[in-house]
Amino acid sequence: MVAEAPHVSKETLASLEATLLNTSGKVPLDKRYRALFTIKALQNEHAVDIIAKGAPTDVLAPLRYLLSHVFKCQGFSDDSALLKHELAYVLGQMNMTSALPVLESVLKDKQEDPMVRHECAEAMGAIGSLSSVPVLQQYVDDPERVVRETCDIAIDRIQWAHSEEGQKHRAQSQEGDQLYTSVDPAPATSGLLSGKGAPADASESNIAKLKAQLLDTNISLFERYRAMFALRNIGTPAAVDALAAGFSDDSALFKHEIAFVFGQLLSPHSIPYLVEVLRDPKEADVVRHEAAEALGGIATPDVLPHLKEWLVREDSPKIVRESCQVALDMYEYENSNEFQYADGLDTTHTAVAV
């Protein structure tokens, strides 16, 4: 079931906008993240009209306005690819077709960071409109591997979403009977779609079968992802070990998704694998960034030194440093008595003054 959107004042909306867009130039990235996920929950067109600056009363208009500023505005001082990629992710999770024009525009911009373009393509796949297929097909031969692989997966996901199995799963999802509420780039293999499989699904033989599918480079990435999300839904230490075997793949996209899945599982059993990825200077930045955020979500004391170290190391890439900053804020939240991570409605009274 969809939670009812909170009612907020125009003053609060203006403060959220100021926080996300960092209009003061002094808002830390982690606070902007929290503002973004607060805005994600504001499914009320009347509450967001002020952010839309007179745009039509469309629930996504404010986010398109915010995205256009972050992606395009010459006067916007921030150049964080991490934040832009997260904005695209949020639009995909909102699952609204009115977001497609801005996502398509950024995907087409070859001057944009490949990680941001990849996230736009993935968001298009999450939204699942057949109208996106021709656009995605234009980039299946993109020079950037992470972009072309994402477009391939997104096309397969859209086609699956409109299949008999996909339509049935959508209907079941709306009933709220799901282990994970995220819109994933690929569904788990049949039988584990909802995350509530039979005991036999966690058997040694079935995990070995899914691991073989996960690592099989002769099949499509979409099918390999299906095994990945099935192993996530099983969630046992043996399933974590099977998933970690995927870190030996040569696809940064594939490895970053494994790290993301570990961030969903929140299993302490995955910590050694994630720390190894974070600390590997030869690993792609997009994979290391996802490992950092997963560690922040797991939030056990043994992850803290690693996040603090890579936040300040001189050889830490920008996206890794920023991810450690966000991860440390997640760590604080997970070890606090705060009610929710998206706390913008509780803190907006200070945002304008920051």
Image (cartoon, rainbow, N blue to C red):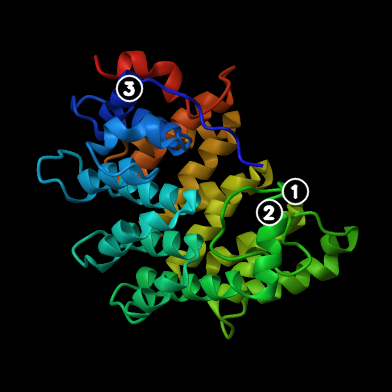
Graded by Cα atoms within 10 Å as few (under 14), some (14 to 19) or many (20 or more), the crowding at tag 2 reads some
Label 2: state its secondary structure. Answer: helix
To which residue does mark 2 refer? Answer: 173
**Image x and y of residue 135, in percent:** 34, 74
To which residue does mark 1 refer? Answer: 177
Q: Residue at x 53, y 52 (%)?
A: 260
To which residue does mark 3 refer? Answer: 10
Graded by Cα atoms within 10 Å as few (under 14), some (14 to 19) or many (20 or more), the crowding at tag 3 reads some
Q: Residue at x 84, y 70 (%)?
A: 205
Q: On the rendered image, what quadrant is the C terminus found in?
A: top left
Q: Residue at x 41, y 34 (%)?
A: 39
Return the residue nearer the eye: 6 or 186. Answer: 6
Return the residue nearer the eye: 314 or 169. Answer: 169
Q: Earlier in the sequence, mark 1 or mark 3?
A: 3
- State left or right for residue 288 relative to residue 117: right
Label 3: state its secondary structure. Answer: helix
> In the rendered structure, which amino acid carries the disc numbered 2?
Ser
Return the residue nearer the eye: 42 or 189. Answer: 42
Q: Which mark's residue is nearer the viewer, 2 or 3?
A: 3
Q: Is residue 88 above or below residue 293?
A: below
**Image x and y of residue 56, in percent:** 29, 44
Q: Are marks 2 and 1 in contact (CB under 8 Å)?
A: yes
Q: Is residue 206 above or below residue 295?
A: below
- State left or right for residue 346 relative to residue 144: right
**Image x and y of residue 15, in percent:** 30, 22
Label 1: state its secondary structure. Answer: loop
> In the rendered structure, which amino acid carries the disc numbered 1?
Asp
Q: Residue at x 59, y 83 (%)?
A: 219
> In the rendered structure, which amino acid carries the disc numbered 3?
Lys
